[in-house]
Image (cartoon, helix red, strand yellow):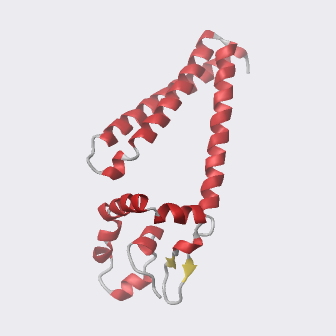
Amino acid sequence: MGMGTSTFVIRWINFLTMLLAIAVVVFGVWMSTHHDNCRRSLTIPVIGIGAVIFLVSIIGFLGALKNSSILLWIYLILLCFISVGVLVFTVLAFIVTNNGSGHSVAGLRYKEYQLHDYSPWFVKQLNNTRNWKHLQSCLVKSDDCKNLSKKYKTLKQYKLAKLTPIEAGCCRPPSD
């Protein structure tokens, strides 16, 4: 693949990524117009992610458009940092939630989820009153728990259902 072809590909990929970043920022602004704290709490991170994607895309697009090796090196280094950041975030997310896969209960198709199965850091975050009140308000506003009684008319249907982790762990008391 020649130099002209690779810069052409980089330009188009970054142009499409810029459009995606603009959509992410618009979505973040749309979320900020809602009056519930669940969506509003994600506004700054969503807009920030969109802005970072847009900035990196602009650098890559201009570097490919102007054949500027400095901009392309900056673009490459930023992509490397972003890749390492995503990898670290993924590994930490697995470490925090590793043991929280649920326990099978005799006679039920869904699994039990218990707080002590998760990492001490995660339990500490949930035990923080401010964090829990925010999370609880999001769970109460979601339709996950409200719709359980509409979905399952009888106790037998409920016990035979394959509940999601939110439904099994947050919407009902433990079996024991």
**Residue sitting at 66 percent across and 19 percent down?**
72
When the figure is inspected, residue 8 is found, relative to residue 168, above or below; the finding is: above
| Residue 123 in picture, x, y percent from top left | 53, 66
Q: Is residue 88 visible?
A: yes
Horizontally, is 63 left or right of 48 in the view?
right
Quadrant of residue 100 within the rendered picture? bottom right
Spot the residue most to the front: 129
Q: Can residue 4 be seen in this view?
A: no
Towards the viewer: 3 or 88: 88
Q: Tell me the quadrant of the picture where the N terminus can be found.
A: top right
When the figure is inspected, residue 157 is found, relative to residue 164, above or below; the finding is: below
**Residue sitting at 61 percent across and 10 percent down?**
66
Horizontally, is 174 left or right of 136 in the view?
right
| Residue 150 in picture, x, y percent from top left | 28, 74
Towards the viewer: 1 or 125: 125
Horizontally, is 142 left or right of 164 in the view?
left
**Residue sitting at 66 percent across and 46 percent down?**
87
Spot the residue most to the top: 66
| Residue 75 in picture, x, y percent from top left | 64, 24
**Residue sitting at 53 percent across and 63 percent down?**
124
| Residue 164 in picture, x, y percent from top left | 45, 70
